[in-house]
Image: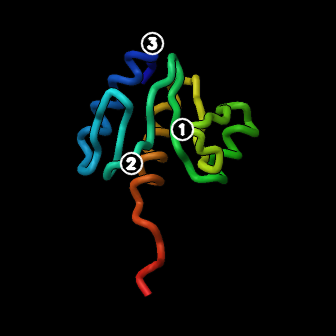
């Protein structure tokens, strides 16, 4: 789908993501199981993705680093290309929403 404005892209993300269990939409952004995974900053989308994905996006000039709440150790990236928002929001949702591996033994 081709989006004309950031507002259109954001509204579509809200509809897509809010259909999933565990996702909450607030004025701050999109949360999965109480953890923020995506929000809008002006006309950009900010998402938390795995470190390797963040590096790839930044190296290709698709995204830029973004500090959230002073947490420079987390891999938040800021993306302007509206057409990438659905894909990156889904990746962020899966990344942040996954239960931690290990710790059961």
- Of helix, strand and loop, which one carries label 3? loop
Mark-to-mark CA distance, 1 and 2: 13 Å
53 left or right of 8? right
- How crowded pointer 3 is (Cα within 10 Å; few <14, some 14-19, many 20+) is rated as few
Q: Position of residue 1 (x, y in %)?
A: 41, 24
Residue 35's disc is 2
Looking at the rendered image, the disc whose residue lies closer to the viewer, 2 or 3, is: 2
- How crowded pointer 2 is (Cα within 10 Å; few <14, some 14-19, many 20+) is rated as some
Q: Please tell me which residue is depicted at 65% across the width and 32% down the height of the picture.
A: 63
| Colour treatment of the image | rainbow
Q: Are marks 2 and 3 in contact (CB under 8 Å)?
A: no
Q: Position of residue 19 (x, y in %)?
A: 23, 41
Q: Please tell me which residue is depicted at 73% across the width and 36% down the height of the picture.
A: 60
Q: Look at mark 1 in the image and give the residue it sits on.
A: 69
Looking at the rendered image, the disc whose residue lies closer to the viewer, 3 or 1, is: 1
First in sequence: mark 3 vs mark 1: 3
- How crowded pointer 1 is (Cα within 10 Å; few <14, some 14-19, many 20+) is rated as few
Q: Position of residue 84 (x, y in %)?
A: 52, 31
Residue placed furthest toward the front: 70
């Amino acid at each position: 789908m081709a989006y004309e404005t950031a507002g259109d892209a954001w509204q579509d993300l809200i509809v897509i993501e809010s259909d999933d269990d565990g996702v909450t939409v607030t004025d701050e952004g999109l949360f999965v199981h109480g953890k923020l995974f995506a929000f809008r900053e002006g006309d950009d989308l900010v998402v938390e993705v795995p470190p390797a994905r963040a590096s790839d996006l930044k190296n290709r000039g698709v995204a830029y680093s973004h500090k959230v709440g002073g947490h420079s150790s987390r891999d938040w990236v800021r993306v302007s290309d509206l057409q990438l928002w659905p894909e990156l929001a889904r990746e962020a949702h899966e990344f942040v929403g996954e239960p931690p591996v290990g710790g059961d033994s």
